[in-house]
Amino acid sequence: MANPAIPFELDRRLAGDTLPVAPMDSGPLLLMNDRRWPWLILVPAMISNGVGAVELHDLAPETARRVHEETDQVSAALKQVTGCTKINSGALGNVVRQLHVHVIARSEGDANWPGPVWGFGERVAWEMDEARGFIDKIRTALGR
């Protein structure tokens, strides 16, 4: 669990590339601001020795279980809202070191299917009304 005496700070790149969706028990849930793929990011707000967690194995076992459970909840909500073919999830962190879990809805025929989303084409930002509608659907599916 995060030490309340040490404030959690979201990485600048994540903050600049995403829109807030909902607070989860482990940390903020964000929407990647690229409408080509319904793409959520869960950021565990965990701090150890004054530094944010970088790897899943940096987490205490109970915290890791909570992050795994919330990743499952987010995945199920995303699948329910989008009706996608496949959910891709993972914690890569090669560019942004702060621990974050990508949960991406993929469907046959989407941009670069079945290839990866990273490094493909140019980002297409969400229209704000469309993003708000999508975020509301995710919140409803999560019961938030």
Image (cartoon, grey):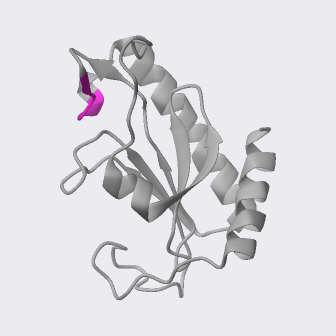
Residue 98, compared with residue 63, is above or below; it is below
Residue 99 relative to residue 89: left or right: left
User: Is residue 100 found inside the magenta-colored segment of the image?
Assistant: no
For residue 54: magenta? yes
Q: In the figure, is residue 95 to the left or right of 38? A: left
The quadrant in which residue 2 appears is top left
Tell me which residue sits at (44%, 13%) in the image: 4
The image quadrant where one finds the N terminus is: top left
Question: Relative to 125, is 65 above or below?
Answer: above
- Left or right? Give the position of 16 relative to 80: left
Location of residue 42 in the rendering, given as x and y in whole percent from the top left corner: 48, 43
Image coords of residue 23 (percent x, y): 62, 36
Q: Is residue 110 above or below residue 76?
A: below
Residue range in magenta is 51-56
- The residue shown at (34%, 88%) is 121
Question: Which residue occupies the foreground of this view, 84 or 45?
Answer: 45
Indicate the quadrant containing the C terminus: top left, top right, bottom left or bottom right: top right
Q: Total of numbered circles in the picture?
A: 0
Camera-nearest residue between 43 and 110: 43
Residue under the image location 23 percent in, 35 percent down = 54
Q: Residue at x 29, y 31 (%)?
A: 56
Would you say 5 lies left or right of 50 here? right
Residue 134 at x, y percent in the picture: 72, 65
